[in-house]
Image: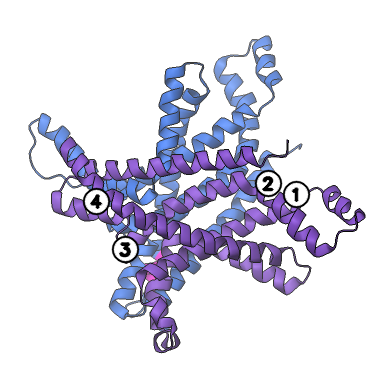
Chain colours: A purple, B blue
């Protein structure tokens, strides 16, 4: 074990952690909106809308994230339409392709989490709102959504951790996130054990932080 | 579309064998995972704080670190570690370990961390009375485990194990970085030589979807079998 190498590679890995965090936060924010949209579509009574939302979540949860990134980064460039219009500004950048893939992926999982949260809201809460004469729209925004978010916090916390681990795949499309930089350092120093263990330590620390943040939020927003 | 036909001109047969490789790696990884959970689940449930700590650090570290990093560590670090051990015994040649073995072991260790958690949860949710009844009846330890605890544990564990199986199946796509020719790697090769990545990666996605769909059907049957009487 080369401890001095582990210490000296730490600053470079930590500066790469900024990219990992950027990828993570951008895809989580976009993914949350996609997830909320598709969770609402899943609850729709219309058969076609319902099936469409189900197919979306089934396809993105049933295929590896790596395939999704490769289709978006390598595959879509093949279509004439993507190359000739303004879309190419987005799809030629590995950074945006990775964010799109991550957002679509986490959106699928988030939609499942939120859907089950919406379905397990006690009908009594909604009925209480109705009997107080609150309009359906306000019941949805002020009662159903906050309760659903509280109920889905533990599952969503797991999803954040899974997504953070997923961002390591950005290194396969040439992005220099923690994993990408770690691999680059290994290719010049030939010390895989030291570097990958240091990188793993940074990821583990981030997992630890997210885990505790979610625990804190759970406590803060508990019903009791 | 004729790129996907079987024979010399198409990639159909290559992709077919690649699919078999994905299935083989997933099954072996899942079995290695069971082996690991057979070791670590008792440690998690034991009353000894030190044994708990070992098992908890295994599941926490593996579930908190990206799968890709674990695979890189095993693939690039594995041969170095083995060569170091070999050098103690006076063997200094370069040793390259097989991508299939490193891949299955790496994915197996990841899968094991998840299935350990599943088995722990399942055993903990078995009614305490069942354990006490076994003791009262004076059953031998292995009969008590095989005939009483195991069937109940499996009923509770199978739905969650099916999730672990899905995670494991999808994780095998990451082994492609080590050069093992499974679905992802074969699609990469085919996409490179035909310059048609969209077709091949989409087809890879379809293959994975088929695998997850078929395995779900099989697991649902198992689930029915083990929940007879409930």
Query: Dot 1 corresponds to which residue?
Result: A120
Q: Residue at x 41, y 31 (%)?
A: B57
Q: Residue at x 33, y 73 (%)?
A: B190
Mark 2 or mark 1, which has the lower sequence index?
Answer: 1
Q: Where is A208 relative to A25, above or below? A: above
| Mark 2 nearby-residue class (10 Å; few <14, some 14–19, many ≥20) | many
Q: Residue at x 21, y 46 (%)?
A: A9
* Residue at disc 3, secondary structure: loop
Q: Please determine if labels 1 and 3 lie on a single subunit.
A: yes
Whole-Å distance between the Cαs marked 1 and 4? 46 Å
| Mark 1 nearby-residue class (10 Å; few <14, some 14–19, many ≥20) | few
Query: Dot 2 corresponds to which residue?
Result: A151
Q: Residue at x 43, y 21 (%)?
A: B51
Query: Dot 4 corresponds to which residue?
Result: A12
Q: Name the quarter where the N terminus of chain B is drawn.
A: bottom left
| Mark 4 nearby-residue class (10 Å; few <14, some 14–19, many ≥20) | few
């Amino acid at each position: 074990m080369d401890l001095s190498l582990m210490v000296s590679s730490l600053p470079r890995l930590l500066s790469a952690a900024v990219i990992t965090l950027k990828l993570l936060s951008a895809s989580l924010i976009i993914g949350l909106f996609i997830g909320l949209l598709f969770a609402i579509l899943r609850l729709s009574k219309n058969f076609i809308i319902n099936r469409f939302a189900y197919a979306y979540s089934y396809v993105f949860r049933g295929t590896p994230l790596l395939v999704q990134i490769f289709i978006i980064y390598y595959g879509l460039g093949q279509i004439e339409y993507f190359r000739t219009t303004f879309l190419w500004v987005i799809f030629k950048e590995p950074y945006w392709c990775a964010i799109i893939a991550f957002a679509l992926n986490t959106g699928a999982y988030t939609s499942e989490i939120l859907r089950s949260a919406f379905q397990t809201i006690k009908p009594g809460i909604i009925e209480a709102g109705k009997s107080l004469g609150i309009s359906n729209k306000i019941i949805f925004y002020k009662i159903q959504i906050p309760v659903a978010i509280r109920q889905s916090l533990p599952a969503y916390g797991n999803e954040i951790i899974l997504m953070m681990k997923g961002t390591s795949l950005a290194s396969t499309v040439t992005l220099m996130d923690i994993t990408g930089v770690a691999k680059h350092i290994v290719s010049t120093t030939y010390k895989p054990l030291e570097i990958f263990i240091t990188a793993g330590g940074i990821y583990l620390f981030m997992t630890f932080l997210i885990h505790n943040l979610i625990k804190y939020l759970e406590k803060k927003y508990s019903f009791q | 579309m004729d790129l996907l036909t079987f024979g010399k001109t198409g990639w159909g047969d290559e992709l077919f064998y690649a699919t078999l490789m994905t299935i083989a790696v997933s099954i072996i990884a899942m079995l290695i995972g069971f082996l690991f959970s057979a070791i670590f689940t008792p440690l998690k449930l034991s009353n000894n704080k030190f044994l708990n700590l070992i098992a908890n650090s295994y599941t926490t570290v593996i579930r908190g670190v990206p799968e890709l990093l674990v695979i890189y560590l095993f693939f690039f670090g594995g041969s170095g570690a083995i060569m170091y051990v070999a050098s103690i015994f006076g063997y200094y040649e370069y040793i390259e370990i097989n991508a299939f073995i490193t891949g299955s072991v790496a994915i197996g260790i990841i899968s094991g961390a998840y299935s350990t958690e599943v088995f722990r949860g399942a055993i903990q949710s078995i009614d305490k009375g069942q354990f006490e009844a076994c003791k009262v009846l004076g059953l031998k330890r292995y009969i008590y485990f095989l005939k009483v605890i195991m069937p109940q544990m499996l009923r509770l564990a199978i739905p969650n194990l099916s999730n672990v199986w899905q995670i494991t199946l999808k994780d095998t796509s990451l082994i492609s970085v080590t050069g093992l020719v499974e679905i992802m790697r074969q699609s990469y090769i085919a996409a490179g030589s035909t310059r048609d990545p969209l077709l091949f990666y989409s087809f890879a996605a379809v293959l994975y979807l088929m695998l997850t769909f078929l395995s779900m059907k099989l697991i649902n049957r198992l689930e029915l079998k083990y929940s007879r009487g409930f």
